Image: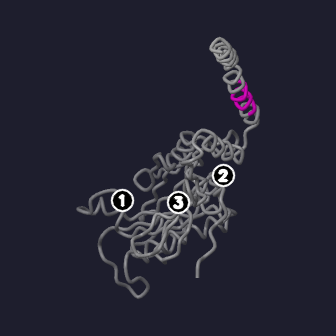
Amino acid sequence: MSRRQSHDEKHANHERWLLTYADVITLLLGLFILLYSISTVDAEKWKDISTRFGEYFNPAELTIGDGSGGNGEGTGAGDGTEETPGEYTGLSGTKSTPPPFIYFPALPGEGIDLDELQMKISDLIEKNDLNGFASVHTEDRGVVVSLVEGMLFPSGSAKINDEAYEILYQLIDIINSVRNYIRIEGSTDNIPIHSARYTDNWALAADRAANVARVMMAEGVDPKRITVISYGEYRPVAPNDSEENRQLNRRVDVVFLNSELDVYEPGNSSEPAPSPTP
């Protein structure tokens, strides 16, 4: 009896390698399918692959913009209400799902390299002898073109100077040659303004940025690409301790946003926008 048991156990152990072999073959098949699927790249496929890799290797903990937790249970807020992991409550008190945190590189032919873009704008500044009135630099978020008040507007006004239009038209030609989203940011110095039209620096900075945006739209820039922001006096690039520095702070920044951040723009999320809660 003991010999038969020993023989059976030995036979079972002898074929266990088949399970490991089958697992390896399955994993290799999955890998080759993934490699084949990314041989032709597009943005939607990158998003899908990012999600599928997360589901395959860490399915229990993955939360990418779908508002669901590992077991679907709320965390509780201590007041008898439950909030689903992956959701947040906005200032209006409504719950919504944040966009997916997925990075994917800009695809070939979908725009221009940021360094090349900065060089083109630098050439524009040099050609028009705008040193001291305009500058350009690159940040993680994209290429930032700073246009100071002295070139664009009269002091305390949002009416664009006549001589500034030609410069704006040349900048718009560059904007129309790329696909990047454009953010127009108005800023001022910290000297309070009280006029018949503007009650504070927020309003002046907003009106200036909006007027620049209107010129761009009139020249064919898609309004869906444009965002207008007012920072007022609260985003200075220099201390407000001299007239020269205050002039640098009275500016409009035109930002060519890095295309890698397109996924964070409204309407570009892979998830549908949440419906408003009454």
Residue corresponding to mark 1: 248
**Left or right: 12, with 75 as reference point:** right
**How many badges with numbers are in the image?**
3
Of circles 2 and 1, the one toward us is 2
Q: Is residue 131 above or below residue 13?
A: below
Q: Amino acid at mark 2?
A: Arg
Q: Earlier in the sequence, mark 2 or mark 3?
A: 3
Question: Which mark is first along the chain, 1 or 2?
Answer: 2
In the rendered structure, find residue 239 and report the number of the disc placed on it: none
Neighbor class of circle 2 (other Cα within 10 Å; few <14, some 14-19, many 20+) is some
Residue 40 versus residue 221: which sits nearer the camera? 40
Where does the magenta region start and end?
25-33
Residues at marks 3 and 1 touching, judged by CB atoms closer than 8 Å: no
Question: Splitting the image into 4 quarters, where does residue 149 fall?
Answer: bottom left
Measure the C-alpha gap from mark 2 to mark 1.
28 Å
Q: Bin the neighbour count of mark 3 within 10 Å (Cα to Cα): few under 14, some 14-19, many 20 and up.
A: some
Q: Can you say which quadrant of the picture contains the N terminus?
A: top right
**Viewer-closest of 190 and 103:** 103
Q: Is residue 56 magenta?
A: no
Magenta stretch: helix, strand or loop mostly:
helix
Q: Looking at the image, which is closer to me, 118 or 256?
A: 256
Question: Where is residue 75 shown, x and y percent of the image?
Answer: 46, 63
CA separation, marks 2 and 3?
Answer: 31 Å
What amino acid is at disc 3?
A: Gly
Residue 34: x, y in percent?
A: 72, 34
The quarter of the picture where residue 56 lies is top right
Residue 260, x across and y down, in percent: 58, 47
- The residue carrying mark 3 is 86
The residue closer to the viewer here, 229 or 66, is: 66
Q: Position of residue 178 (x, y in %)?
A: 65, 50
